[in-house]
Amino acid sequence: MLKIFALTFTFCLLFSTTFGINPPVYPTKYRVTGIWQIPNGNVTEPILVNFDGDSDHERVDYYSMNITTALGTDIIRDDLNKTYELRIQQDHQGCTIFQNAGPSSTAVDSNLPNVLPNLTDSAWVYMGESVVRGIHCYYWQMNITEYNKSNSYTFYTDADGNPVRYLLHGYNIVFHSHYDIYILDYYSYEPNVNDANCYDIPPICNSTETVYSDKVAPVPLRALVSGLRNSRSFNSYVNEYNKDYTGNEYEKRKLIYEENLRRIDELNSQRSFKLAPNHFADLTLEEFKSLMLPKKYSEINVQLKNAVPYQRQNLDLPDSFSWLDYGAVSLVKDQGVCGSCWSFATTGATEGAYFLATGKMETFSEQALMACSWAEGNSACEGGMMYGAYDWMTQNGLTTEELYPYLCMDSYCGYDKSMQKIGVSHYLNVSVSGDIELTKEMLYANGPLAIAIDAGHFDFVYYQSGIYSSKDCHSDFDGLDHGVLLVGWGEEDGTPFWIIKNSWSELWGDKGYCKMAQANNMCGVCTVPSVPVITTHF
């Protein structure tokens, strides 16, 4: 009996050790299906990924729950230096063609995002066994600390090495986005798939309606993530983030990375707020803008059909005030990597107005605004503006987030009046743009305000704490590119500031919030504030 036990123990130890040293190696061609989740953003998306590393092809299709037709498709053809992005535009499908890496491109690199990690990398450590979704699994983990933030990546396989789950807590190493929690559950895996037809260019991409963009090709499944490690070494950065630059690209990215670190260090020694580098540290500022900010507000055609200028009432205002203290602000949301900030700013202002009208907090649907307000000048994940959303709401009202949940992607318009929970008669905007005291009064009298700011600067994206200010931030309308929510004001060490709620999850900034200096209408806070006027609620 003792011999049997000893033999069993030796076998188990040998198996565990061997499995830990020799993890599964995935082929250069495969097909997987799975469910992608962003818990903080309440996002659940079925996906289908076809990957052909040999031919530099990748295709990602993503869906809505219980819908079998793809809502969006990205076809990456690095052999042609192009990415073909198919998106729903209210009631039809459109195609946008982006330029990938090449002589005239500003793209980051030409490497395909791989949803199956390279577990043979020494950074991945075999941890043992676990049970996931009722499946007995082996799992590996990679842990990094980046500027006082822990990043943990855990990958689970079954006994045959088939992928079961990819859990990412931090800046992910697959796609590009902010610090968050992400889960990819795999439901099928086919190695060595040869399906060249799935990478064919769709006929719609050769039509007269095709849009050709000179911007950097967006990363497929833009709700997914990548990150930068707490290491000053560019080699460590490259290895840990699976960067694989070719030719002269390595030296180019190294110089950009080192310059960004130098600039961040310099700003931290000069500014009153704290910032730190992240997963965009190998990008120039122009590359970052092209990748993350789809449109300037001045590029969006809105009519202001139902706007009423707010007139000063000479109210007696307190030195500090925040709607957070009164329950008029919902929890911080997460837009993912989709240019839908305008819809979150709109719902934030709507939630505040609803609270003032009813005394109750209800969260409203960003997806309804994204899917249905194209006629008012908005373009879902490709950008929009609050005014267009309000104009749509005056005709259609709005439903709740529960009835029409967020998908983090373009989709068909599925809204009908049976879903309506509020009616909107018009909306208020400022009678004098850029007036700090008028904006305070409007905020105090009407609830949280949807505002547009200039977020096209890396020191805002990397903001962590303190009162944000930047000499590079624009306040004129032409410089605005990001919708956020203004919820209050205060003063700290003699510096007046605004309290701003962002939609990049509570893991960004100060639990999702930012203090922004008031002086000189910093970043355009007072340029176009607005709020809807609710007349009915059901």
Image: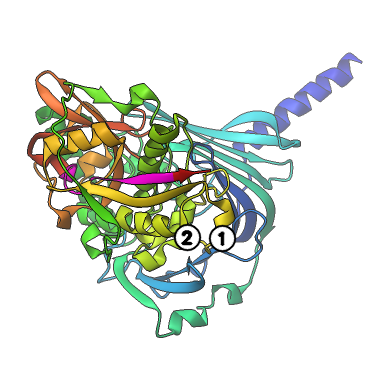
| Relative horizontal placement of residue 248, taking residue 507 as reference (left or right) | left
**Residue 218 visible:** no
Q: Camera-side residue: 227 or 351?
A: 351
Q: Are marks 1 and 2 in contact (CB under 8 Å)?
A: yes
For label 2, count other residues whose C-alpha is less than 10 Å away and answer few (under 14), some (14-19) or many (20+): many
Disc 1 from disc 2: Cα separation: 8 Å
Quarter-wise, where is residue 390 in the image? Answer: bottom left
Q: Camera-side residue: 26 or 21?
A: 26
- Residue occupied by mark 2: 371
- Vertical placement of residue 347 versus 214, above or below: above
- The boundaries of the magenta stretch are 524-535
- Vertical placement of residue 216 versus 408, above or below: below
Q: Camera-side residue: 422 or 148?
A: 422
Please state which amino acid type lies under the numbered disc 1: Gly
- Residue occupied by mark 1: 414
- Asked whether residue 402 is drawn in magenta, I would say no
Image location (x, y in percent) of residue 124? 52, 36
| Relative horizontal placement of residue 240, taking residue 233 as reference (left or right) | right
Image location (x, y in percent) of residue 179? 40, 37
The residue depicted at 34 percent of the width and 75 percent of the height is 212
- The mark found on residue 514 in the picture is none
The residue depicted at 44 percent of the width and 29 percent of the height is 359
